[in-house]
Image: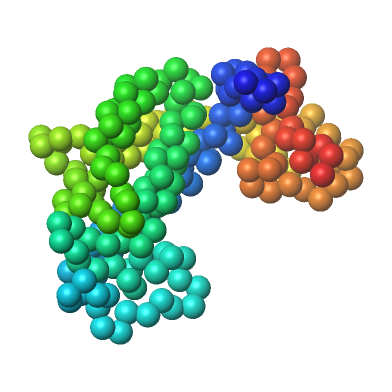
Amino acid sequence: MTEKTRIVAHLEARGLMLPGLVHEALAANDRLKAALTLLQDACAAAECSTGGEPRAGAVPTAGDDTPGMLARACRVEGGYRLPGVGALVEDMRADLRWMLRPLTAQGAAQAFEARLEALERRLPELVDDLAPRGFVAALASAQRERADSLHLLLMDVHRALNRLAAGLAEETVDGAQAFAIEPDDRQRIAAFISLRGKPRPSGREGIARRPPGAFLFPLSFLHG
């Protein structure tokens, strides 16, 4: 573990990076939902193909960010050919682990991590863009009585993140997002922002966090 990694882990464990972690986790949740929808749409598109060829008229459009999966999906023996499916599933696994980071920092991710590891053990090898029939349906299943799925895990982690986010007292102080501050801290934060003579920050880069007895500002705000 590098020194930078140790510092980041220490800050996460103390909760100093929690608002940013939650922000990134919820963004990962949105990407995962979009990826699941893409896989389902690609399977539907593949059903419209004939003879192992993409459906007629399927041409990638300009700006298409799905690497041609929808346009070139087709049926093959035993499943589907979904261009880019292997890389997409790896990205989905990474996003799920990213979603768990704020929960890990709070000591609340063990059960979710165990479920993710069990799901990963069940993943087939996606060689040459080939996805077995039923693979995407199993990922997207919402039927708890049948088996756990990526979709079910995603929903449960999302609920846990929403509960965590609801407990973060966050407000805007002179254009900066402040986390866990006391009522009399607002004037001091505003005075610091004014003293810097810098453009007022916005969004995640402007978060001011307050560990006991001190304020913590992002380096990009202090020096950028």
Q: Quarter of the image holding residue 61?
A: bottom left
Q: Quarter of the image holding residue 161?
A: top left
Asked whether, in this view, residue 36 is left or right of residue 200, the answer is left
Q: Position of residue 65 (x, y in %)?
A: 46, 66
214 shown above or below 71: above
Q: Position of residue 32 (x, y in %)?
A: 38, 48
Q: How is the image coloured?
A: rainbow
Q: Quarter of the image holding residue 37?
A: bottom left
Along the line of sight, the residue nearer the viewer: 134 or 125 = 125
- Whether residue 185 is visible here, answered yes or no, is no
Residue lying at 61% horizontally and 29% vertically, measured from the top left? 17
Asked whether, in this view, residue 29 is left or right of residue 16, the answer is left
Along the line of sight, the residue nearer the viewer: 51 or 186 = 51
Q: Position of residue 78 (x, y in %)?
A: 15, 57
Asked whether, in this view, residue 187 is left or right of residue 211, the answer is right
- Whether residue 205 is visible here, answered yes or no, is yes
Q: Residue furthest top?
A: 212
Residue lying at 39% horizontally and 40% vertically, measured from the top left? 93
Q: Residue furthest bottom?
A: 57
103 shown above or below 219: above
